[in-house]
């Protein structure tokens, strides 16, 4: 364990206290150049090779606003149902960090570009929860510090630190919620669902890949508790830079339990930032949290205000793509599935995979069948997510095609999928290597049927006597003899033909 902090059970915490959350999500925009200079934002370059006097904060270097960054901010604001400012400006947020070469961050303070919006999110049981958005504002990212020589990768215990300013100045949008109240014991689920929906929205807009594991999207989790039935918010903690959906959920749950333990024990919550630990889901203290006045905000004198025309804003609005919730409702109608079925697809993380499989040529019902059946089973057994499986939507579509053509039955198709998953090649290669094609030669099938009838005379007599259901036993015998490679429906037809029985 990272800490030995005492916790109360989640149920005991919620019996006494009501959680209040605030989520701050930083999204790294996918622009080609930085927010205030022309340096490249491409990942993977040698440290400090994508820098210039502007992003290094050299005296006399003047910034210029990235127009694509502004447009991306407006797109995000509109998609979040925000009002777009007719006039806004940047500010200097002053603080000292080694990875902030200017000793201030160019951000927005009291005049954000987008404000007063909301995002509806759907929980696992289908309930829709509205998260209100306070603001979405533009700013720049910091550089990256690498602490060397310690056991934890943090500055404490390190012998020295390395600084890479390639990331300094990359455009960020910070999206800040209003206080999220009313979630009750579902607060962790609401937080996870909100960040998931926001990530889907950002990707749909095309403004960022929003890959949390790469730091392109990060969430700061603010949480406080108040006694049930009271209005006044408690003192909050802020867990910084949480970088996965599961971790957002775990951070909220842990902080609820930690806050409750402190308060029930007669202690006082300290307003501070905290670090989240992936290994055990705990948080530890970082630093006492600054208030806004500690940053000494003042308007950035080197940048003119941003005043997007209403015509431009409406042009951007008209060009917005179909947003995730609208798309889900459309697909549900097109596929003819229930709201519960669609929720199961979402919970499994299968929506985009099914859509891509349909785009590759598979019928919708077949795409759903394989992803939600055999492939979900395999993902659960191996403890992986569906999108991590070693099979592509195009390969699943090919399996569905082979089944529809009669080259495979479902049993053989499952073996083909297994072969693809373990790296034996694409579906056609697996079929060839394993010899999995359906036996379609009528002569071979007829011989197998005759053998099954001869070896099961009593069952054959029952069928002749009118007990057609008994044919299943003979079908099973033929399927066993052909190693499952016969078409069961055709086998049944041949059995009844041989025995002179007609189904009525």
Image (cartoon, rainbow, N blue to C red):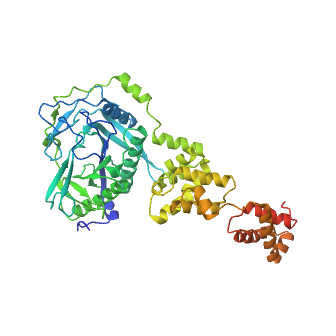
Q: Which residue lies at the image location 32% right of the left edge and 36% below the top edge?
A: 32
On the rendered image, what quadrant is the C terminus found in?
bottom right
> Which x, y percent locates residue 111?
24, 32
Q: Which residue lies at the image location 49% right of the left edge and 47% below the top edge?
A: 352
**Residue occupying the far left of the picture:** 59
Left or right of 105 on screen, residue 324: right
Q: Is residue 198 above or below residue 270?
A: above
On the rendered image, what quadrant is the N terminus found in?
bottom left
Q: Is residue 45 visible?
A: yes
> Which x, y percent locates residue 152?
22, 62
Q: Nearer the viewer, residue 400 or 277?
A: 400
> Which x, y percent locates residue 339?
54, 49
Q: Is residue 228 visible?
A: no
Left or right of 454 on screen, residue 102: left
Q: Nearer the viewer, residue 71 or 162?
A: 162
Q: Nearer the viewer, residue 11 or 121?
A: 121
Q: Which residue lies at the image location 41% right of the left edge and 42% below the top edge?
A: 203
Q: Quadrant of residue 295?
A: top left
Q: Is residue 481 above or below residue 91?
A: below
Left or right of 457 on screen, residue 253: left
Q: Nearer the viewer, residue 315 or 78?
A: 315
Q: Is residue 468 above or below residue 371?
A: below
């Amino acid at each position: 364990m990272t800490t030995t902090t005492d916790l109360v059970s989640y149920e005991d915490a919620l019996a006494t206290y009501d959680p209040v959350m605030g989520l701050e999500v930083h999204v790294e925009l996918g622009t080609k150049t930085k927010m205030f200079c022309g340096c490249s934002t491409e990942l993977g370059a040698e440290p400090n090779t994508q820098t210039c006097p502007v992003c290094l904060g050299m005296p006399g270097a003047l910034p210029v606003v990235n127009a694509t960054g502004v447009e991306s901010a407006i797109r995000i604001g509109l998609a979040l149902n925000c009002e777009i400012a007719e006039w806004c400006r940047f500010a200097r947020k002053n603080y000292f960090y080694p990875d902030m070469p200017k000793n201030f961050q160019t951000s927005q303070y009291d005049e954000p570009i987008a404000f007063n919006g909301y995002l509806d999110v759907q929980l696992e049981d289908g309930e829709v929860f509205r998260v209100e958005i306070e603001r979405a504002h533009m700013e720049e990212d910091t550089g990256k510090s690498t602490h060397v020589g310690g056991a934890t990768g943090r500055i404490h215990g390190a012998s020295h630190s390395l600084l890479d300013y390639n990331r300094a100045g990359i455009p960020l949008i910070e999206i800040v919620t209003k206080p999220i109240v009313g979630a009750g014991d579902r607060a962790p689920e609401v937080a996870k669902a909100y960040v998931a929906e926001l990530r889907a929205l950002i990707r749909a807009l095309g403004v960022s890949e929003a890959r949390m594991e790469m730091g392109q999207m990060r969430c700061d989790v603010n949480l406080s508790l108040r006694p049930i039935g009271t209005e006044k918010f408690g003192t909050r903690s802020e867990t910084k830079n949480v970088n996965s959906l599961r971790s957002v959920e775990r951070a909220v749950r842990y902080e609820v339990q930690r806050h409750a333990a402190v308060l029930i024990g007669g202690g006082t919550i300290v307003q501070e930032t905290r670090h989240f630990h992936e290994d055990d889901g705990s948080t530890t203290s970082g630093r006492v949290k600054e208030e806004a006045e500690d940053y000494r905000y003042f308007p950035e004198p080197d940048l003119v205000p941003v005043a997007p025309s209403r015509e431009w804003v409406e042009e951007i609005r008209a060009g917005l793509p179909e947003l995730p919730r609208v798309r889900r409702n459309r697909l549900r109608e097109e596929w003819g599935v229930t709201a519960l079925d669609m929720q199961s697809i979402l919970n499994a993380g299968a929506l985009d995979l099914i859509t891509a499989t349909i785009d590759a040529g598979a019928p919708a019902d077949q795409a759903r069948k394989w992803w939600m059946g055999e492939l979900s089973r395999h993902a659960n057994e191996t403890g992986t997510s569906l999108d991590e499986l070693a099979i592509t939507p195009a390969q699943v579509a090919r399996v569905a095609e082979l089944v529809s053509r009669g080259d495979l039955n479902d049993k053989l198709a499952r073996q083909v999928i297994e072969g693809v998953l373990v790296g034996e090649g694409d579906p056609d290669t697996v079929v060839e290597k394993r010899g999995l094609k359906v036996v379609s030669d009528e002569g071979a099938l007829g011989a197998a049927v005759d053998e099954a009838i001869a070896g099961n005379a009593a069952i054959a007599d029952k069928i002749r006597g009118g007990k057609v259901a008994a044919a299943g036993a003979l079908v099973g015998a033929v399927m066993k003899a052909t190693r499952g490679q016969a078409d069961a429906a055709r086998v049944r037809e041949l059995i009844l033909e041989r025995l002179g029985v007609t189904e009525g």
